[in-house]
Image: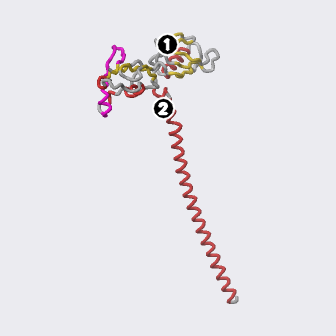
């Protein structure tokens, strides 16, 4: 082998070795970029998943009346029927002021004070005498019977539908706030109970100052907030 050929082979060898190093370096860099991209994609997927939960799951929970174990009242409207029974297709029924409604085969049903699950189970139990494995379709379509009242020194006295509940401060807000002549520490809530009418006191200035917050009770259907 000539000296010229030997030098040429050395140069070719170095070039091939450099090419291998370049190729290896390129591959390592590409692998690192792919790894970073994978981590970025995973973080992005996790973020998108979290956002989807808050956008879709939470509003449903906030607006789902039945998730609060809502108890029915006279004046509420319900959709009720029996699944796969052409004679008992779901229809809208308004619960009477005494808390009842009528349904085929089982007659008068007492709904007031019961949750949807309780009422459904009760109706299915009674219908089993006439129908094999009945499945009752039951949902609340309007909560018009769940009402509280605000009267006295407020700007917009009246009745307010609670969906599903509001507290005293929220009721005063719905009533447009108090007038300049209101005695803010003399507000009371009149509440009917099995033992008779109760009086709950609400001292606005204490609650507004962050004290005695337990006075800001959730209102119940039929409550009357009196602002002297």
N-term-proximal mark, 2 vs 1: 2
Residue projecting furthest to the bottom:
3
Q: Nearer the viewer, residue 84 or 188?
A: 188
Residue 160 tag number: none
At a point 49% along the width and 36% down the height, the residue shown is: 58
Q: Badge 2: how crowded within 10 Å, few (<14), some, or many (20+)?
A: few
Q: Position of residue 75 (x, y in %)?
A: 49, 16
Residue 208 occupies which quadrant of the picture? top left
Residue 91 occupies which quadrant of the picture? top right
Asked whether residue 225 is in view, the answer is yes
Label 2 – label 1 distance at C-alpha: 27 Å
- Left or right: 156, with 10 as reference point: left
Secondary structure beneath label 2: helix
Residue 62 tag number: 2
Q: Position of residue 106 (x, y in %)?
A: 54, 11
Q: Which region shows up in magenta?
A: 190-210
At a point 66% along the width and 86% down the height, the residue shown is: 7
Q: Position of residue 90 (x, y in %)?
A: 59, 19
Residue under numbered circle 1: 96
Q: Nearer the viewer, residue 85 or 194?
A: 194
> Considering only vertical position in the picture, is 97 above or below 212?
above
Q: Nearer the viewer, residue 178 or 106?
A: 178
Answer whether residue 82 is magenta in the image: no
């Amino acid at each position: 082998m000539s000296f010229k050929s030997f030098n040429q082979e050395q140069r070719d060898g170095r070039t091939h070795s450099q090419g291998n190093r370049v190729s290896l370096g390129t591959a390592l860099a590409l692998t690192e970029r792919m790894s970073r991209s994978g981590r970025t994609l995973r973080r992005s997927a996790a973020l998108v998943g979290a956002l989807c939960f808050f956008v879709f799951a939470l509003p449903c929970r906030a607006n789902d009346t039945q998730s609060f174990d809502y108890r029915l009242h006279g004046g509420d409207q319900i959709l009720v029927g029996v699944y796969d029974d052409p004679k008992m297709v779901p229809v809208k029924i308004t619960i009477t002021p005494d808390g009842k409604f009528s349904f085929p085969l089982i007659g008068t049903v007492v709904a007031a004070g019961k949750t949807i699950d309780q009422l459904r189970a009760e109706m299915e139990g009674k219908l089993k005498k006439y129908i094999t494995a009945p499945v009752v379709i039951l949902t609340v379509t309007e909560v018009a019977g769940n009402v509280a009242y605000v009267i006295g020194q407020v700007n917009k006295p009246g009745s307010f539908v609670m969906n599903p509940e509001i507290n005293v401060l929220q009721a005063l807000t719905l009533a447009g706030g108090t007038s300049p002549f209101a005695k803010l520490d003399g507000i009371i809530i009149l509440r009917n109970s099995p033992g008779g009418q109760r009086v709950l006191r609400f001292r606005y200035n204490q609650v507004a100052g962050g004290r005695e917050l337990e006075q800001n009770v959730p209102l119940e259907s039929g409550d009357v907030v009196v602002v002297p």
